[in-house]
Amino acid sequence: MTNFRNHLYFLLLGALALIVLPYFISSRFYIDVLTLIFFTAYLGQSWNILGGYAGQFSFGGVMFFGTGAYVSSILLTTFGFPPIFGIFLAILGGAFLGLIVGYMSFRSGLKGSYFALITLAFAELLRVLANSVEFTGGGVGLFLTYAPGLSNLQFESPVGFYYFALILMFISIAIVYWLESSRFGAQLVAIRENEDAAEALGINTLKCKIYAIMIMGAMGGAAGTFYAQKYLYLDPPIAYSIHLSVEMLLVTIVGGMGTIFGPLVGAFVLHTVNEIARHFIDTPGLSLIVYGLILIIIIGYLPNGLIGAFKKKEKKSDSTSLDKKTSRGDS
Amino acid sequence: MISASLSMLPAAIINGLMYGAIYALVALGLTLIYGVLHIINFAHGAMLMLALYAAFFLFHLFNIDPYFSILIVTPCAGIFGYMIYRYGIGPLAKGKDQNILLITLGLSIIIENGALFFFSGDQQTVNLSYGFEAFDLGFMYLSYPKVISFFAALLMCAILWAAMSLTDMGRAIRAVAKERQGARLVGINVERIFAVTFGIGIACLGAAGCMMLPIFYVDPYTGNIFVLVAFTIVVLGGMGSVVGALVGGFIIGITESVGGLLLGESLGQIGISLIFILILIFRPTGLFGSKV
């Protein structure tokens, strides 16, 4: 228990540091990079719930992001509905999309590569739809007006968005913290480790997986509103870009799947590498080449991500986190 | 509007068939790899894009006709595929399905952005002397490249089929696909067969890339367009089924061109992802497949 207490103090200290950090950084550049790191960590965390904990890899995670972004932006542009409430409808929209996609694909027993591919197809389907119908602005896109204010979730200084992203990330970490200690989280891990065994133990695997993808969807929806209000522009290739889908899984896998801080660590490392690479050679594509290489290296040599590699060294005698999780899942 | 569309329907169907044969060749590589190795090569589109660039540069630098390049690019692509499986994917993946998916995803990111880095994002096309000549079918014009590519793709499929059924290597590959352990027991080097199969699958892409170059443009993102197309065909036809890949290729080719005609350029693309989702949900074994 003291271990847990120490852990908690450490955590609060880290959170506090991130909260006061903007007072010590005057450079807009660093604030923006940090905002982006929190944003990707948040999205990665949403992927982590379904991919890392429940073991269902999605290649189209961006669909929730895009749908949420469209929900709140269309409400704003057509009805003048303030995004501070719109974000909740975006969350609902994302969760509802998660319900549909989850129900359709999990009920048919799709898993592994098939599930990954069907989520990719759903994202592609939504991209084509958004491109073809009128109320999304079609290929021209949606332009949001710049009107800073809390009700618009827009801020004059980048520090405002820094805190917005930070809050989102804190919430995502809280969700996964809850997951780690909840029955539901244990059920997800049981599904990941052995779905048939989980089913035999009486876990309603279909329901659990659908709940997991709904949580992912809800989180993605909020991220969409954040993005739309920060960048004030949305079009189908942005809203449903495969790059964001890849980035979500990338940061999580690099940091460590099924861990609380994996996505944050991954997002931090990848963005830092990206900025350094950009500093030396600023050519399109280079940073993504590095991302691809890192992904392959991590899969090949560090299947538990950076956190996994770190933990292994730290406590060799202690039972590994994986053992703990499976035993909890079985009980 | 509708009647005008309907009168163009036969033309759209024939166009779809022409593309369908090439799609089938792309999908054939994917389905072969799946049938034998039981892995999904997510980098398939990216490797196709590389083949297109190879054909493009052969034309651009040495003025070699893309259809002649088939003879050069196909074996090179085969060797590339063999090497990349033998020394990359195979040792790294350690046999886990999701690992392979992620490694090939990483590979596709590297290839795509490597192309962006070296070749820039500009769209490239070739101008062939016969590129604008066309057969007059009465109700439509059919350009020479489309017709040549159609027959070349069919010929390539036939050669592959013959090689798979008549040669020792083909027999060994089919043996491994059917019964991995049994094949090992009768002395087949399964690891080598895996790499060879991967090589053959990529060789199909090499040929397909050369046939596509006179018809399509190429840029670093070309592969993205075809990756979902190829997966849809493979899932539609049944993972690992050669006949399925052919039939699926034609169905998708026609769906795409008829969809574009009836629903418009933008919404017409919806057919492919819709078919993909519906097939996965209602008949994941595909039309000709026997197992998932």
Image (spheres, helix red, strand yellow):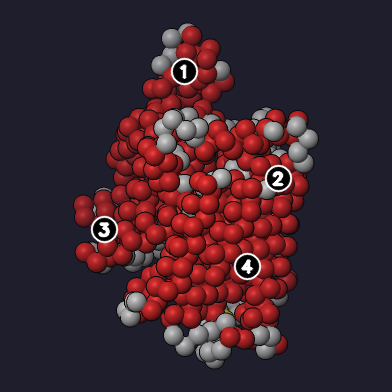
How far apart are the alpha carbons under marks 3 and 2?
51 Å
In the figure, residue A234 lies in which quadrant? bottom right
- Residue drawn 53% across and 65% down? A169
* Residue type of the residue flagged with mark 3: Phe
Q: Tell me the chain of label 3.
A: B
Check disc 3 and report its element: helix, strand or loop: helix
Q: Which mark is residue A221?
A: 4
Task: Tell me: residue B116, above or below residue A6.
Answer: below
Q: Are marks 3 and 2 on the same chain?
A: no
Foreground label between 3 and 1: 3
Q: Are marks 4 and 2 on the same chain?
A: yes
Ranked by sequence position, the earlier of labels 3 and 1 is 3
Q: Quadrant of the N terminus of chain A?
A: top right
How far apart are the alpha carbons under marks 1 and 2?
50 Å
Check disc 1 and report its element: helix, strand or loop: helix
How far apart are the alpha carbons under marks 3 and 1?
39 Å
Percent position of residue A96, x then y: 73, 62
* Residue type of the residue flagged with mark 1: Ala
Q: Are marks 1 and 2 on the same chain?
A: no
- Residue drawn 52% across and 55% down? A8
Residues B215 and A171: in front is A171
* Residue contact at pointers 3 and 2, CB within 8 angstroms: no
Residues B71 and A161: in front is A161
* Residue type of the residue flagged with mark 4: Gly
